[in-house]
Image (cartoon, grey):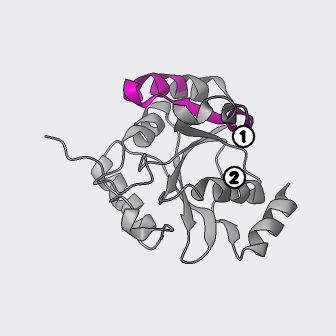
Amino acid sequence: MKEVSNFILRIFGWQAELSVTMPDKCVLAGAPHTTNWDFPLTILGMAAMGIRFSWVGKHTLFRWPLGILMRALSGIPLERRSGGARFAIKAFELFRDRDRFILAIAPEGTRHRTPHWQAGFYKIALKSNVPIALGYVDYKKKMIGIGKTLVPSGDSSKDFAVIKEFYRDKSGKYPEKQGEVRLKKKN
């Protein structure tokens, strides 16, 4: 599957790049997320890098008949109305119970511009005691990859300075839709 995925990416001028040794367990942050095209590129890119992963998507993607395919691609539905709390508990259990588990989450939470990232990916990694791998789909460079891992310290300001610097030169298909790499300001 690696060779086939690499071949397909090359046909369209894309490359996959794995710059880190992937841990057995981690939260894989995927950004920027500005178009539905990010999904098939991510599936191809991860296959090209030889990485098996699960991913989070809005629950409506998992309805009949598309739901069969989404689950076959290791998708996990997220019911947004619950605020992600039930999903976070499920994620903690999956990390606890599995020897190998890579969970991909798009921290922007949507393909539209947001003033901040959602904190769920960070909280799940911190509470599950797993690193965060920083993944990207860069349309300007036509690269998809994973370029850095970060062990969350609990100091979100310090950790997000590292994350923001990593994504500084990554460009989504629609850069104007990229969310700001920061957490919501606390009141």
- What residue is disc 2 on? 43
Q: Could you classify mark 2 by the number of other residues whose Cα lies within 10 Å: few (under 14), some (14-19), or many (20 or more)?
A: some
Q: Is residue 21 visible?
A: no
Residue 108 percent location from the top left of the image: 41, 50
Q: Residue at x 47, y 28 (%)?
A: 79
Q: Determine whether the residue tagged by mark 1 lies in a helix, strand or loop.
A: loop
Q: Residue at x 72, y 40 (%)?
A: 73
- What residue is disc 1 on? 73
Q: Is residue 22 visible?
A: yes
Q: Determine whether the residue tagged by mark 2 lies in a helix, strand or loop.
A: helix
Residue 78 sits inside the magenta stretch: yes
Residue kind at label 2, given as amino acid type:
Ile
Q: Earlier in the sequence, mark 2 or mark 1?
A: 2
Q: Is residue 138 above or below residue 66?
A: below
Residues at circles 2 and 1 in contact by the CB criterion of under 8 Å: yes
Rendered image: mark on residue 88: none
Residue 2 percent location from the top left of the image: 83, 58
Q: Which residues are magenta?
A: 69-90
Residue kind at label 1, given as amino acid type:
Leu
Residue 112 percent location from the top left of the image: 39, 55
Quadrant location of the N terminus in the rendered image: bottom right
